[in-house]
Amino acid sequence: MQPFETHTGIVIPFNRSNIDTDAILPKQYLKMLEKTGYGPHLFDDERYLDPGDVDTPVADRRLNPECILNQTPYSQGSILLAQANFGCGSSREHAVWALRDFGIRALLAPSFGDIFFNNCFNNGLLPVILDQELIDELFERCGVEPGFELTVDLQNCEIQGGGSTWPFVVEEGRRQNLLQGFDEIGLTLERSDAIRHYEAGRKIQEPWLFR
């Protein structure tokens, strides 16, 4: 998993609440077998004038010019700004994969769907919970300055932009895992020596378990 330390990018403002995982990645794309390749289908129903067309190659589909992801400079954005309860709905990890494949590294919102929130940390994305007042201020800045950039600093738990700095809070265990690029499997493998030592002791104490 790609570590997250500090990231600077263009903010993509999605000024809506309750954006669910089916909107982030519609259900017809859950049939794909790999963990990559979902970026072109992020917000598919909004992004194309032929939504949900799984038979036509992406290069031949008709882009919706009204969708912010198709507009310059947001098509190059990597920090997504949203309102409350982002990522609610079904527990599809594919929604996080789509955000990651598009190039999103951090998400800013007043709250997130619980399972989506956990999936972000397990896939190298940083979801940051901010006060509603600050979220509204950031939307205002995006409105007057298209292409507004922020720096999200996980080392110091700060967001910087436009001459201002705002602190945020992340649970320390999650912070360390993201800084080091560990998902749950990677974290377990880091302790493989201790696991082998424990298993060797069990074989001596309770050998019948290993026959």
Image (tube, rainbow, N blue to C red):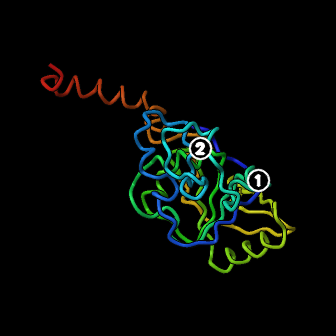
Residue 174 appears in the picture as rendered: no
Residue, far left: 208
Please identify, in this view, whether the residue under mark 1 or under mark 2 is nearer the observer. Answer: 2
Residue type indicated by callout 1 = Gly
Q: At which x and y percent is residue 59?
A: 64, 38
Q: Secondary structure at mark 1?
A: strand
Q: At which x and y percent is residue 159?
A: 74, 63
Decide which of 13, 138 is in the foreground and name it: 13
Residue 55 appears in the picture as rendered: yes
Does residue 7 appear to the left or right of 42 in the view shown? right
Q: Residue at x 45, y 42 (%)?
A: 184
Q: Residues within 10 Å of mark 2 (few under 14, many from 20)?
A: some
Q: At which x and y percent is residue 195?
A: 37, 31
Residue type indicated by callout 2 = Gly
Q: Quadrant of residue 198?
A: top left
| Circles 1 and 2: CB atoms closer than 8 Å | no
Q: Residue at x 19, y 27 (%)?
A: 205
In the rendered image of this protein, does residue 190 appear above or below residue 18?
A: above
Q: At which x and y percent is residue 19?
A: 52, 66
Q: Secondary structure at mark 2?
A: helix
Does residue 201 appear to the left or right of 187 in the view shown? left
In the rendered image of this protein, does residue 64 appear above or below residue 101?
A: below
Residue, far bottom: 133
Decide which of 179, 192 is in the foreground and name it: 179
Instruction: Tell me the residue that label 2 is attached to.
Output: 39
Which badge, 1 or 2, comes first in the chain's sequence? 1
Q: Quadrant of the C terminus?
A: top left
Instruction: Tell me the residue that label 1 is attached to.
Output: 9
Q: Residues within 10 Å of mark 1 (few under 14, many from 20)?
A: many
In the rendered image of this protein, does residue 35 appear above or below residue 94?
A: above
Residue, far top: 211
Q: CA distance from mark 1 to mark 2?
A: 17 Å
